Image (cartoon, rainbow, N blue to C red):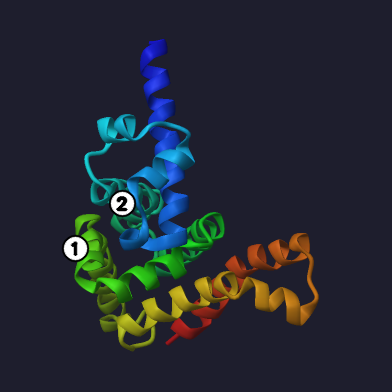
Amino acid sequence: MAEALELSTTEQKILEAAKKVFIQKGLDGARLDEIANEAGINKALLHYYFKSKEKLFEKIFDEMIGKLLPDFSAIIESQNPIEEKIEFFVHKYIDFVSENPQLPLFMVTEINRNPQRMKDLLGHTQNFIILQRFAFQMITEMQVGRIKSFNPLHLMLNIMSLCIFPIISKPVIQAILQLNEADLNIILQQRKEEVSRFIREALRP
């Protein structure tokens, strides 16, 4: 049991170190020996857990997306009203990007560097299937007149933009509004209700 716990701790140290290096330098710029040094282990031990930096990158990507997808999948499959599903997504998404503020810019950078690789990774996490199912549900609601008729793609883009922008522009907002960290965090938490309310009003037929 102690050995298994030690192995698990070592693997977690590797993942945390790799996440830091990948965010700083991207997949192409990261080196395994750099990740090993950051984790405080030798390169041979790193190879024992992960055979390549690509496998390590995929593991980290799956882990981060996995924090969001299981709950989101559950709410999409539920019988809850579409407004509640959108509100749930807004709350979860803002929490997710608040806890991982470097992720949006990191993903944009990696997509620009290698669009096909990121497309494969996103497909691997079943993101597209979940979003397609959500879009189909919205179209059904539009057809019966429960919500206003518009392109579901734009709704998803609007939601993600409203959630992400305050976080990726956090330093600019702090500088312009002269906000300390605590005050800004309060505003970011208030965004959950503000964005949800904005979307609900936009959906009214």
From the top left corner, tell me how far across and down residue 21 is, in percent.
44, 53
Crowding near pointer 1: few (<14 within 10 Å), some, many (20+)? few
Amino acid at dot 2: Phe
In the shown orientation, is residue 53 left or right of residue 65? left
Which one is nearer the viewer's eye here, 46 or 174? 46
Q: Secondary structure at mark 2?
A: helix
Q: Quadrant of the N terminus?
A: top left
Crowding near pointer 2: few (<14 within 10 Å), some, many (20+)? some
Which one is nearer the viewer's eye here, 119 or 158? 119
Q: Quadrant of the C terminus?
A: bottom left
Q: Residue under circle 1?
A: 120
Q: Secondary structure at mark 1?
A: helix
Q: Residue under circle 2?
A: 57
What's the distance in space between the residues labelled 2 and 1, CA to CA?
13 Å
From the top left corner, tell me how far across and down residue 203 is, in percent.
44, 82
- Give the mark nearest the N terminus, 2 or 1: 2
